[in-house]
Structure formats: C-alpha cells, structure tokens
Image: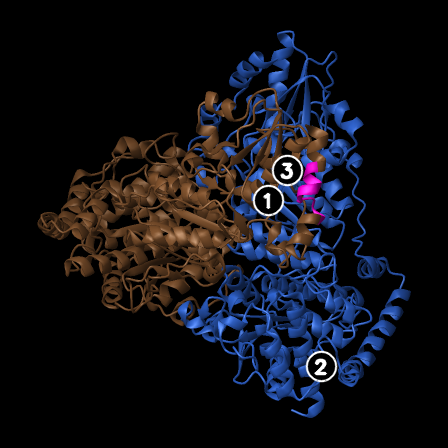
Chain colours: A blue, B brown
C-alpha cells in the first residue's frame, strides 16, 4: 500500500472514530475494520459524481451494516459530497445531515435508509433488478445500452447475513443472475454479543454458491490490492451476483481490537491518542490533512469524470430524439415521472356490475400497466390468488429482464424490500400477498414509509371472509398495523369504483401505500364514487335529516348499505360513509370532515378487524369490529358466527340509533 | 411395496382428497404426493401413542406445510387418534376438530399450529432444542437419559424452505447440532404460481450442508423402502440435524398431477372416480375399508406399545423418588408447573432507588431464574444491550445443552418461533431484542397468541428515548401493534416495582406476553405498587377531589408524576394512573375500571407512541402521543423536540384541565 493510500484510509478511520467519540455514541469497530474496503471501492470502482449525487446512472452503494454510518459519512465527506466538517461534528445530533443510521433523503450519497439488519442488502437486490429492467427498456427503445449500466455495491456484516431477509434476497438475486450486484462482506468473526462462533456455524460462501452466486475470499482486509482484484474479478462475472468475503479485524488498532467491546462503544481519549501515534498523524480531533482529502477526490475524479461527461453528452444526444417512447424515458430519468394520466372519470361501470374485487383490481391494474412501462411487480407465490399478474406482459427472468411479472417465490419479506429498491429508482413497483402475511413484511414496509418511496403493497384476502383457511390466514389486527405506520397510506375500497379511485390517487401521489382488496364478489355500492376516494372518506347516499352515521370500509360497506336500507324502513335515516382511507380523510380540513361526519350524531363503525383503528371516530360500544382470532369454516358460517350479517348488525344498530 | 402398505397409503390418499372435495376447499396436491412419506414415518418411526397424544416423551410431528392438513387429519384418523369419520366429514367447517390448517389445542396429534409458511419448521427447532435441554436436565438429576429422548420430525414443502425464517432456524439447528431433528422435504418442483424453477434456482441440499446439516436424497417419493432407509440413516447421525429431500409428484394420480392446478383446488367427481379406478378401490366417498385402518393401527401399536409401556413403568419408578429436584421434574412433566412461587411482596425496594430499568429487569430475571430450571432464553445478538443474560448460567451450546443462555444470532424471527417451540413444552422461554425489531417477529408472535403458549417476549429500547440511533431504532407504532394481537398481554412497567409486579403476573398466568422495558434510568415512582400490576392500570397517588386523570405508561409515568406535582402547585388535583397493561385493565370489572378512571373527568394520556392505542380512554386532542417517525439525536434533544418534557406537557395539560 503506498503512502497516499494509507494516509487516505487513516484519514477516514480517524474522522470516523473522532466523530463517534465526539458524539459519545456510535460504532467504531466497523470504521477501523472496514475503511480499506471503502477506500478501495470508492477510489477504484464506484462510478459516482459527488457533485451530482442524483446522477441516474451512478453506481449505487448501500451500507447494509447501517451502524457503520460514521465510516460512510467520513468516506462521503472525503470523497467530496456536500458534507462538511461541521456536519461531521454534528454526527448523531438532531436534524443534522449525519444521523445515527444512514437516512435516504437526508445525506447526499446515501442511497437507502439502513439500520435494521438485512434490509440494505435486500433493497439493493431491488436496485440491481431495476438496473436490469431499465437497461433492457432503454436498449429496446434506443438500441443502445449505454444509458443505464450501473453496478450496485453493498457493504454488509455478519448480522446482515444472519437475517432471514438476506437469505431470501440472496436467493432471488441468484435466481435472476444479477451479475452487477456485488456484496462486500466485512467478515470479522465478532458480533455485538461476542464471538461469532457462539451464534454461527456455517460455511457461508458455500451457502451463497448453492444459491447461484459467484464467491470470492480475501484473507486480509488491509490488503487493498487483493480487495481490488476480487472486485475486478466479481465485475467480470456477468451472470451471477458476487459476494466477496473479506476478513477484517473489528476495531483494528484500538485497544480492544478483535473483540465485541469495540463494536458499539466510542473510543476513549487514550485510545484515540494511541491510534494517532501508531499512524504517525498529529492532527487534532475532527481535523484532517487537506492533502489527503485532495488526493482522494482527485483519484475519484480522474477515474470517473470522463465517464460522467460522456454519459451526459450521450444523454443530451438522446434527449434530442423526438420519438415519444424516448421522450418518455427522458422524462422518467429527469424527474421520475412515469407519463401516465389515469383518470377515474374515464371509467363508466354499470350499476349492476358484480365481480370478485380482486378480479376488478386485476383488470384496472392491467389497464394501467398497459399505458406505461414504469410499472412492474410480482407476488410471493400468490399471484394466481391475489390476481396481480400483468396478463399481457412477460415474466421477469434471467433470460428476459424486460419481463414485468416478478416471481418472488414464498419470500414476502425480501419481496417488500425489493419493491422498495425498485421504488427508489422511481419505478412504480407493486407486490402482493394475503393481508394476513403483511406481518412478514412490516420491517420493510416501515422503511418504505420512512424513506417515503412510492411502493405499492397490495393485499387480498382481507378479513375473516377468507373462510376455510382459518385464523392463520384471517387478518384481524393487520389493517390497524398498517394504518399505524407513519407516512403509509392504507386504502380499503368497497367496490370497483373505489378500486379505480384508489389507483388514481395512488398514481397521482408518491406515497408508500397499502391497497387492501377483498377476494370476494362485491356489487357496486349505489352512490360509490371513484373521484371522491381522494378525500379518504365520503358520504354514500345522503340522508336528511341525518339520525346517525355508519362508517364502513371494504366489503363491510355493502353490508352497511343493506343495514341502512333496513333502518330506513324502520324510520331511521342513517348516513353511510365509506372510509376508504383514514389517513387521507384526516388530511382534509375540519369543515370537510364535519360535513361527512357531523358533530352530535351517533356514529357506528363496521369493520371486521381490530377496533383500535376507530377511536378517533366513535366509542367502543358503537364499533362493530373484531378483536379475537377468526375460525375456519365457510365464509358465511364465519361471518355469521362473528356477527357480520345484515340481521345481526341491524339488531345492534337498532339499539344504538 | 406390499399390498397392505399400498392399501393403507391409498386409504389415506382417498380420505384426504375426499374430505377436500366434500368441503369444497383444501389442498389435494400434497395429499396425493406425500402420503407415502406420512405412512413411512407413522408406521415405522414415530414413537407415539394415539390414545395418549400428550405423552411427554412422544416424538413430535410438525406439518410445516400446514395447507396439507387433510393429509395430516387422514393420517391421524387412520393411526387411531381421537378423530372419527364425522370429524373428517366436517373438514374446514366451523368449530370442527378438523380446521383448514392444523391448530394446536383443537386436534389430537397436532403439536403446533401451522399455515404461515416457515413457522412450523422454526418452531420445531425450538421443540428439538427443548428436548436437548430437558434430556440434559433429567440426566443431571436422575443420572439417566431414558425419560426424555424424543425425535422431532417435520414435513415441509418448497414454500417453507423459501421463507427467511426457515433459513434462520436451519442455521440455528446446525449451530446447535440438533441430531434428533429430522426434516422430510416434500420436493415436488411445483409451487402455487407454477413451476418451482420460476422462483428458485438453488442447490438446496448444498445449502443445508453449508449450514451443518446431514442431507439425504430420495429420488422416488413412492419408494417407501428408500424413504425408510433415509430416515433410519438420518436417525443415526446424532450430531447434526437431517434433511431428507424426497422427490414427489404433486397430486399424483389425479388428472392434473405434476402441475400447480392440483395444489389448492378440490378434485372433481370424475377425478375422484378415476383415482378409485386406478387404485381398484370401490369405496364410497369418505368411506374406508376397516381392514386397512386396523392394519395401520396394528403396525403402529406393535412397534410402539412396548416402548410406551416401558417408559411409563420407568416414569412410575422415578415418581417414587423423594428428592425434591426429581419431584420438581415430575410436577413439570405431569402438568407443566415450573414450581416457582414468585411473590412480589417479598421485595422491598428503597424509595430513592434509581437504575436503568433494563438493569432492574435483569436483576429480577436472574433472581427468578435461579429458583427454577424451567426458565431459559436468549437474545438476537442484543443480550448485552437488553441485559437479559442469566449471569450465573452457562451458554446453551452443542457441547452443553444444559446452558440456559441461548445465542440466537441476529435472527429475530426464528428466535420468536423457537421461543414458541420451547413454550409448547411448558418451558417458560423468553427472548429479547429492541422494541423496534419486534416487527421482524410478528408472524411468530401471532402464532404464540393463537396457540396461547406462555412465551415471554422481552423488548427494550422502547421509545424515541433511544436517542442517537434514530428513527430506524425508535419504536412508534410497535406498542400498539403488540397490543392489537388477540390473546397477547403487553406490559410496559414504569419502574422496578412494576417490573417485579409484571413478572409476578407473567409467571402466575400462562398468557403469551410482551414485556416492554425502558433502557433508561428511571426512579421509583412514589406510590407505584407491584401488587397492583395484576389489575393492568391502577391509581398512583390518589387525588381528592379529582379534577382529572393522567394515564401514562413506562418511562412516561415519571414524566406524568412531575407534571401532576406542577399542576397541584397551580391548584389542579389530577390523578395519576399507571396503565401497565391495557389488556389486563380491560379484563377488570367495570366498577374497578371506573374507580380508577371516573366518568365525567377529563382524561389525558401520555405515551410516546401511536395514539391509536388510546381511543378507549380519551379523545385525540387529549392524547400526548407520537404518530410520526423519530429523529436521531441525544435523547433529551429528541424528547424535547417531540414535546415530551415536563414543561411542554404541563403547558398542554394546563389548557386541558
């Protein structure tokens, strides 16, 4: 290793451990162990322009071991991103550019929010799949691949690779032969609780080999030449993803190197002083030698600037093409616009239309997808049951990256994270499974919500009306769980009109969403209105005078409509409100909210799920909800058993109104 | 295959597909594909007594592919369990003994509730670990291993093995060298959505080999001799778990054999007729030939009855021993009692006691664990942070199955399922991670709740007060999510007294529980009372007259206490209620509830989490809650930013009261 290189690495190391000690919080172990890996990647491989962190064709770097944020920020600063020493000094301070774990949208150069282990790697698989899809799309429409050909690099640790989601994602990456995905595995034999051997007894590279990965091993994590060669070899393997196990020493050079003590506790003053002594560097805390920084930036610039310039020259050329397909691509790359104008008022649905709602949703999805190439998605082996396949589109496969139906297998968790990865590219990616199995995806859905990416999670089989499959397949608390995730917008449409309205709203906004669809046959609700879905809740069938309100969602709206008719016969004028989305309704002004649900009238809620969702609207005694597990049986038996029939609800309502 | 065997297998097959067609719902594919595997296992290996399905030392059988319930019920009926043809005819009917997926506690012979894929296999790992632990305990105290030496068998499909949780569980099983765990893998190359090759490209046995498993391959799923030999070989490998891949044809013999069509749709009348023709059996639907049933029962009885008798003879001998350790074991095996009398009123905590609550919890846990050998547990690599290690106990390892500290690695999901498996043996198993990562565990926690096993989920780092680690590590919606799971009891104690009370209550009941503990230093709340935790919520510091109530939980109780003092200075007499457990409070009679929270007083809630939890107690404008993601920063900065300081809450309260 020449002195320049050593100095740059030492600069990154010191800056990283300094900022942790300064913040009195953070993880120095990975900083000292993995800095040479970061140096090698950024100096010799990563195609980036720190002045333009949003360059669409940049190589992506995902720090799956998100607790290594100090290492990342030190590297990004040194590489020339818009992060200064003031930001570094405010590491882990509130509202700084350098939060405790990397957060997408906060720090230039951070491509994915990470921290919960395994998520970064799985999201990276989505980013790598998106590269293949977009490269294919570009080549189809411009007969040229140059526009999109980025690599996706991941730095991960033992923790990431123990998580089930990372296995699922690795299996999918192997299935699709993602040659441009390269995982750098910081292998230090230590976890937070002690020696790795206490919790792992695996031949990890053999496991990845079994999943159709190319594997590399570097025995010395300080050997930047060996790391460099391994990355170069990995890049040459184009039909398989690569993992490079790099043996490092956690906290190398610190008093507690090689132990779990150095994983997550700041170094002492003595330790920092000693490090500097060993490195023969006499800077102050959080101080750098400009020359080292300049050298690093020059190395990156010398390697990348010409590529970057050429890409933009070529892109400018392409921009001149007037073909609409190409203009559509440009619009997408420039601002993430998918060139879709989906208007619900273009649809006229006959009043007597009756169909399984999942089938209606399928039709709408297929119409939408036929109008833009930027929608793709798949299912966790329930596509034929959720009915979310794009019937005129090919399957995404290692032989056809142009396919838009992704077979995720029974891997709900990685599917969710991959959907996030695709969404980070501005693709409108969707995925589907049964609502009950949303539980498998929550850690990734939470990250979609935190990153505010426009991921579309579709769930069918949305209540005890699932019937025979029984309580393991019957959601109770799942709607509530999704609603409780900040930033996520949950839709539960009542009929095909509301499905159309939900899609219009989903596509006109960029929120992460959950679209919850009944599997059962549902008629058109008289008065349902696609254009009103955007208000979240709206009045179906105005009643004046208004003796009360029934709020319902999804398949329960139909039930509520019948009960309201029965009540009318008995002289009670009760208003029906379809609450497609609580989140959207609560965003409306108070005047609108009160026009839908007036003060001083009794409000009943009907939803076959947890009553916890409804405290903002009424009191528990007026909630016809379900807070216990379901039962296996024919759906009519089950609904009757739990009181979700017209007669039983009417009886309750008569007591209330 | 001799005719007797063939006839028994055909009987199981026909009964399985008949009951599905009769119910018009179910999964015939696995019935026809895997019946020979079930036959071989039950006839030749499984040590069971159908007349005593609760025999503690029975071999366990877990159908991880829970959609194969018809195959299981047909086999259990044929084997002689207390299931009759009437039950079979009511397959998937409400409140029958034969629900859509196997449910623990409903059907004799069903050891685990399964259906959500991967869960069965992971739970089985817990059951196999429990066998090792209990065998070790027995041998230590009786110098003899005969009492506990059961095998744990699993039948799983491709779907199970795609799930991340099954990888996590397999890795743990390999780590601990669970030689008595044997997985039978029904390998049929078809999934619900089509050919397996669309979603899997793995050398599966190589992957398991890499995880320290013994692997076997049987090329013909009809070859009962080969299956038998493979199981026999697997049993001989005592230091590794075994997986036997058995190639089968899904729906074999039906018109759509070998395709996904037969996976989940009942067979037609023609198909059933044709099957009978091919088998040369002319029974009616749901009819069996008694001779075949008798033969099967005789085979099982001839093999097992002597072993069973000997075991009980030996057990009776042991029962006569008067040693207290042995009597304790007997009590445990007889009725699951862990012989612990933990009384909170034995503890006297000084009023000025201040300590991190996780540290207090650690001390209490260690005291409890020292008094009974039936408590064990571990952490997902956060034991040193959650502080849940049993400091005087050994580590559970393949060299020491007597250890009571389990190293789960960063595998939260499998940890949860394994905790369920241990709990199914009546062990009081606990596991710990950060509250934010409870999301990784929800599918398994849901099954614990559905099965009502006494699993103890411990979560620390329970709010934005986590501080620097930022929003990925700061729970917001997690408390609510846990509370919304039916049957699960959530505790969030405010101080060491309430920690003691929570443990007393947890150990005196057999509910699945989540125990949520602050990582931060918390003083004793004046008036807190361990003995009142059992009421869920109780009055701390009676105020008469009562101008209002503040409900708070966990670390927010201390904040509320300060605010109440401030309010008193200003002439407002506000009562403090600590709501340790909403679930327990709502179980109290209305009189008690109203004595704690009187009607007609204003109620404020303080909890740094989703407001959705509190609709039963007050209105949104009086909830001091948090419905957005947190921020990275020092905890005091973060709490202040979100308004969780004495001054800011006082200001709000002054406007309300």
Q: Nearer the viewer, residue B231 or B452?
A: B452
Query: From which residue to which does the magenta span run?
Result: B641-650
Identify the residue under disc 3.
B563
Report the chain holding disc 3: B
Q: Looking at the image, can residue B250 be seen?
A: no
Q: Position of residue B392 (x, y in %)?
A: 34, 61
Q: Position of residue A93 (x, y in %)?
A: 70, 60
How many angstroms separate mark 3 from mark 2 (CA)? 55 Å
Q: Secondary structure at mark 3?
A: helix
Which mark is in front, 2 or 1? 1
Q: Secondary structure at mark 1?
A: loop
The secondary structure that dominates the magenta segment is: helix
Q: Secondary structure at mark 2?
A: helix
Residue neighbourhood size for the residue with mark 2, other residues' Cα within 10 Å, grouped as few (<14), some (14–19), many (≥20): many
Pointers 3 and 2 within a single chain: no
* Residues at discs 3 and 2 in contact (Cβ within 8 Å): no
How many angstroms separate mark 1 from mark 3 (CA)? 25 Å
Residue B593: mark: none
Residue A43: mark: 2
Q: Quadrant of residue B99?
A: top left
Is A195 one of the magenta-colored residues?
Answer: no
Which mark is in front, 3 or 2? 3
Report the chain holding disc 2: A
């Amino acid at each position: 290793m020449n002195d320049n290189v050593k100095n740059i690495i030492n600069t990154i190391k010191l800056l990283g451990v300094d900022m942790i000690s300064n913040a009195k919080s953070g993880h120095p172990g990975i900083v000292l162990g993995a800095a040479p890996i970061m140096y090698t990647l950024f100096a010799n491989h990563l195609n980036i322009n720190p002045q333009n962190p949003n360059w669409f064709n940049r190589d992506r770097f995902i720090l799956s071991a998100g607790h290594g944020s100090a290492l990342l920020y030190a590297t990004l600063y040194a590489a020339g991103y818009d992060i200064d020493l003031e930001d570094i000094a405010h590491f882990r301070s509130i509202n700084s550019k350098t939060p405790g774990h990397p957060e997408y949208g906060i720090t230039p150069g951070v491509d994915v929010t990470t921290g919960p282990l395994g998520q970064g790697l799985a999201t990276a698989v989505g980013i790598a799949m998106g590269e293949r899809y977009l490269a294919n799309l570009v080549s189809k429409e411009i007969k040229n691949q140059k526009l999109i050909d980025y690599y996706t690099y991941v730095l991960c640790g033992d923790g990431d690779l123990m998580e089930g989601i990372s296995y699922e994602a690795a299996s999918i990456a192997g299935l699709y032969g993602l040659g441009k995905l390269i995982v750098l595995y910081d292998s230090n034999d230590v976890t937070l609780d002690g020696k790795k051997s206490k919790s792992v007894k695996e031949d990890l590279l053999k496991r990845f080999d079994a999943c159709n990965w190319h594997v590399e091993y570097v025995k010395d994590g300080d050997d930047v030449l060996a790391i460099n060669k391994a990355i170069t070899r990995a890049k040459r393997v184009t039909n398989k993803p690569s993992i490079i196990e790099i043996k490092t020493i956690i906290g190398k050079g610190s008093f507690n190197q090689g132990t779990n003590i150095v994983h997550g506790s700041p170094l002492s003053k003595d330790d920092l002083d000693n490090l500097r002594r060993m490195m023969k560097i006499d800077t102050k805390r959080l101080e750098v030698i400009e020359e080292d920084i300049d050298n690093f930036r020059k190395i990156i610039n010398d390697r990348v600037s010409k590529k970057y310039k050429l890409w933009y020259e070529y892109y400018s050329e392409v921009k001149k093409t007037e073909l609409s397909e190409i203009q559509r691509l440009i619009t997408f790359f420039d601002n993430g616009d998918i060139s879709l104008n989906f208007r619900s008022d273009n649809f006229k649905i006959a009043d007597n239309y009756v169909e399984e709602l999942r089938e209606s949703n399928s039709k709408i999805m297929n119409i939408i997808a036929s109008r833009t190439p930027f929608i793709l998605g798949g299912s966790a082996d329930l596509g034929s049951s959720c009915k979310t396949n794009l019937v005129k589109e090919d399957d995404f496969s290692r032989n056809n990256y142009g396919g838009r139906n992704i077979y995720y297998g029974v891997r709900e968790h990685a599917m969710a994270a991959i959907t996030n990865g695709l969404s980070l590219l501005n693709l409108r990616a969707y995925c589907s499974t049964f609502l009950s199995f949303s539980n498998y995806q929550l850690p990734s859905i939470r990250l979609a919500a935190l990153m505010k990416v426009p991921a579309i999670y579709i769930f069918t089989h949305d209540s005890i009306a699932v019937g025979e499959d029984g309580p393991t397949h019957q959601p109770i608390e799942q709607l509530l769980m999704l609603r409780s995730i900040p930033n996520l917008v949950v839709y539960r449409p009542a009929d095909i009109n509301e499905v159309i309205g939900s899609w219009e709203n989903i596509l006109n906004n960029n929120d992460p969403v959950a679209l919850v669809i009944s599997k059962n046959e549902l008629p058109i609700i008289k008065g349902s209105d696609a254009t009103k879905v955007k208000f979240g809740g709206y009045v179906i069938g105005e009643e004046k005078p208004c003796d009360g309100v029934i709020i319902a969602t999804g398949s329960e709206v139909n039930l509520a409509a019948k009960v309201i008719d029965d009540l009318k016969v008995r002289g009670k004028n009760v208003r029906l409100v379809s609450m497609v989305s609580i989140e959207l309704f609560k965003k409306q002004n108070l005047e609108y909210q009160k026009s839908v649900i007036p003060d001083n009238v009794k409000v009943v809620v009907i939803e076959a799920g947890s009553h916890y969702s409804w405290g903002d609207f009424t009191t528990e005694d007026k909630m016809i909800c379900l807070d216990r597990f379901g039962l296996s049986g024919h759906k009519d038996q089950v609904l009757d058993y739990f009181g979700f029939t017209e007669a039983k609800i009417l009886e309750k309502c008569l007591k209330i109104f």
